[in-house]
Image (cartoon, grey):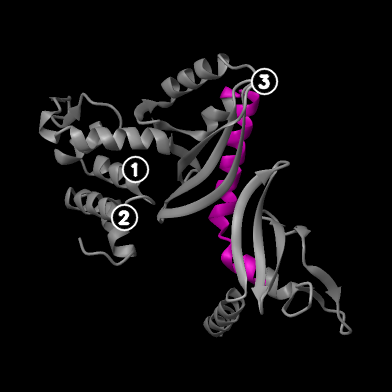
């Protein structure tokens, strides 16, 4: 019976989805909001919902209660209408719980920067983090962040165009446009940025932006893997002297499955071929999570 109800809901939502479009997710006034558009028959109108409790914040649609007492939203000429229940079913179905959970991480990350609250950042970061291409322990990352923010007492950041990209069952990549104001007299600068979240404990394991990634990718193209010097650590495994993505690639090439998986995550959402390539390398290096990812998404090992 439950399965039948699920199928009915899925079919209903699928039909609604032809006329409802999911828009941007963004942060403002301490909450996360998501835009939706009702579209059809040459007309459209927009709605904005609180992503946390699905409460309506703003709409350009006509809000009407019909003769049967049912709340509906319609385009201006009433060519297309949706009941409030239909909208909420669609929003609940399309809005993933992990998005809401991760939005809290992102919101706290923004708040910590705007208040220069290092204790809050300590709670958000994993014990080891890839920080703008550098693999650092949490303590060093916090020191670097504190030093950078100390230079700009008026530093403020806001974010827009947020997207959640499930990378694995336990990892989510959040991409967003980061607007930074270093001084009240200066104009904002925008950096396409992202965080990689371990959904198991809601910790940030990667923080970077597309400019940093682009520079590392250029370096990796022109730097032969064999030319990178390596050394052996106490466990008799290779540890590259290079930092960031180059070091991870080198460690991966020497059989470190965990590092292969981190390289795959680096390319996730931007280069599918490389992502799958390095997940396969990780699996072949006996990384169980990588093998589970391949099985989960139906890829060969």
First in sequence, mark 1 or 2: give its number.
Answer: 1
Q: Which mark, by number, is residue 279?
A: none
Assess whether residue 98 is covered by the magenta stretch: yes
Q: Is residue 9 above or below residue 171?
A: below
First in sequence, mark 1 or 3: give its number.
Answer: 3
Q: Nearer the viewer, residue 213 or 13?
A: 213
The CA span between labels 1 and 2 is 11 Å
Tell me the quarter of the picture where residue 50 sits.
bottom right
Q: Which residue is labeled 2 in the image?
A: 272
The CA span between labels 2 and 3 is 41 Å
Select label 2 or label 3 by which is in front: 3
Q: Check whether the beta carbons of the residues at disc 1 and disc 3 lie within 8 A of each other.
A: no
Name the image quarter holding the N terminus. Answer: bottom right
Q: Which mark, by number, is residue 185?
A: 3
Assess whether residue 57 is covered by the magenta stretch: no
| Element assignment for label 1 | helix
Q: Which residues are magenta?
A: 89-118
């Amino acid at each position: 019976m439950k399965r039948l109800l699920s199928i009915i809901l899925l079919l209903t939502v699928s039909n609604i989805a032809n006329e409802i479009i999911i828009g941007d997710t963004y942060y403002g006034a301490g909450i996360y909001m998501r835009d939706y558009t009702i579209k059809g028959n040459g007309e459209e109108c927009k709605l904005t919902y609180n992503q946390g409790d699905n409460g309506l914040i703003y709409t350009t649609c006509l809000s009407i209660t019909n003769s049967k007492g049912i709340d509906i939203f319609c385009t201006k000429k009433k060519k297309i209408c949706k009941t409030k229940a239909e909208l909420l079913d669609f929003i609940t179905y399309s809005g993933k719980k992990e998005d809401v959970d991760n939005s809290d991480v992102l919101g706290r990350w923004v708040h910590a920067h705007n208040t220069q609250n290092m204790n809050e950042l300590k709670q958000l970061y994993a014990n080891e983090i890839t920080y703008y291409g550098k693999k650092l322990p949490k303590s060093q990352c916090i020191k670097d962040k504190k030093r950078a923010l100390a230079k700009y007492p008026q530093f403020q950041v806001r974010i827009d165009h947020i997207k959640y990209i499930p990378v694995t069952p336990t990892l989510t990549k959040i991409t967003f446009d980061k607007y930074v104001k270093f001084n009240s007299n200066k104009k904002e600068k925008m950096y396409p940025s992202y965080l990689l979240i371990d959904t198991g404990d809601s910790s940030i394991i990667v923080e970077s932006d597309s400019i940093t990634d682009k520079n590392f990718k250029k370096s990796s193209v022109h730097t032969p893997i064999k030319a990178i010097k390596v050394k052996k650590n106490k466990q008799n495994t290779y540890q590259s002297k290079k930092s960031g993505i180059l070091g991870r690639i080198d460690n991966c090439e020497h059989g470190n499955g965990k590092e292969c998986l981190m390289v795959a995550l680096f390319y996730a959402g931007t280069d599918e071929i490389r992502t799958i390539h390095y997940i396969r390398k990780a699996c072949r290096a006996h990384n169980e999570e990588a093998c589970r990812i391949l099985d989960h998404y139906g890829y060969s090992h």
